[in-house]
Amino acid sequence: MARRIVLHVDMDQFFVACEIRERPDLMGKPVVVGADPKGGKGRGVVSTSSYEARKFGVKSGMPISQAWKLCPQCVYLPVNFELYVKVSNEVMEVLRGFAAKFELWGIDEAFLEVTGKAKDFAEAEKLAKEIKKAVKEKTGLTCSVGAGPNKLVAKMASDAKKPDGLTVVRPEEARAFLYPLPVRKLLWIGPKTEQALKAMGIELVEELAEADPTVLFERFGKMGPQMRLMAQGIDESPLVETWEAKSIGNQRTFENDTSDEKEIFAKLDELGDEVWGRAGEEGVAFKNIGIVIRFTGFETHTKARELRKPCGSLEELKKIVHELAVPFLEEGRPVRLVGVRLASLKREKGQKKLGEF
Ligand code: TTP
Ligand code: MG
């Protein structure tokens, strides 16, 4: 079997980069996108900050009031999600063109399976350079790319050098690359797991990789030995092509992974409202309804249903979305992301696209 090569692409300072594209005068300035700081009294958090603002210590997720304390001279901008979705679509279209298989992972990141497109890691590196060039030319934005033998290593590699980075980790280099990192860097390890591991004397990826799997199982259940394998750079999860080119869909990541069904269904309903609205705006009927569910870690599932006739109402859409989701939620496993997608689209006669009026 040919050795796998996976790329992970992550945009640099994404929300800020979109804002700078609209307002080039902001280039090189400390910029913060997030809640209104209200002179230090604001509530809410920082969505992201420019690399210049990061020098002051301002980071994603930090209370906006704290950001203000660290950097009152930063330029503060509200979140313009619509703009970021538009730019994200532009970026993803470029990336899709380079991949044998494509998986959208977040608004500013994606996995590209390039096994077969690049015969070895030297070719993968060349391809990654072409990708960076194409993204820059077509969207004006920079990204960081990681190449590795699987999703896990590729994702960690793209994070290794930012902004505008390119990091290639060959299979034989994977352990040396991962081992010195703190366990928190492994993407599915949140602050709680980090603390639990620390209490066991495990702080580095290397320590996790070499920990006793029985002890890990006792403490974390099935996730324990799984975490250990990933610390060793072992990950066989395939790319899951969440959306086809011709579909209307969206997906959202929970702020904190959740197994609360109410919260999950509420998010699915919200996405249902959104895609129903978009189908209406674009004047299309649809016969195929799909969902995507990603559990904590990498495991992603999609499920779709083809109807015999076009979906007739928002209630029907939501009902089907719930029915598709139920089997995945039975075990109560924490969910990281959900999505809803409409496909088998048909333009309804007499309807024009919104932009054509
Ligand atoms: P990231 O890729 O984590 O961050 P980034 O692109 O801003 O910066 P980097 O160069 O380090 O990749 O997240 C992508 C976008 O998601 C980010 O621009 C804003 C949004 N986001 C939030 O709204 N809240 C958060 O806590 C994080 C981490 C990101
Ligand atoms: Mg990013």
Image (cartoon, rainbow, N blue to C red):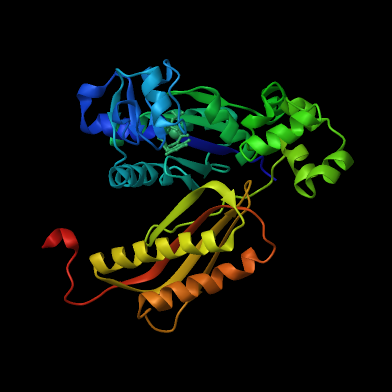
The residue shown at (60%, 40%) is 151
Give how far across and how far down residue 76 sits, in percent. Answer: 29, 28
| Ligand 2 falls in quadrant | top left
Q: Residue at x 25, y 31 (%)?
A: 21
Q: Nearer the viewer, residue 38 or 224?
A: 38
263 over 1 or under it: above or below: below
Determine the residue located farthest toward the front in the rendered image: 41
Image quadrant in which the C terminus is located: bottom left
In this view, the residue in front, 251 or 255, is 255
Residue 136 appears left or right of 128? left
On the image, the x and y values in percent for residue 112 come to 51, 43
Q: Residue at x 86, y 45 (%)?
A: 218
The image shows residue 36, relative to residue 312, as above or below, that is: above
Asked if residue 47 lies left or right of residue 305, the reply is left
| Residue farthest toward the bottom in the current orientation of the protein | 308
Is residue 331 something that shows in the picture? yes
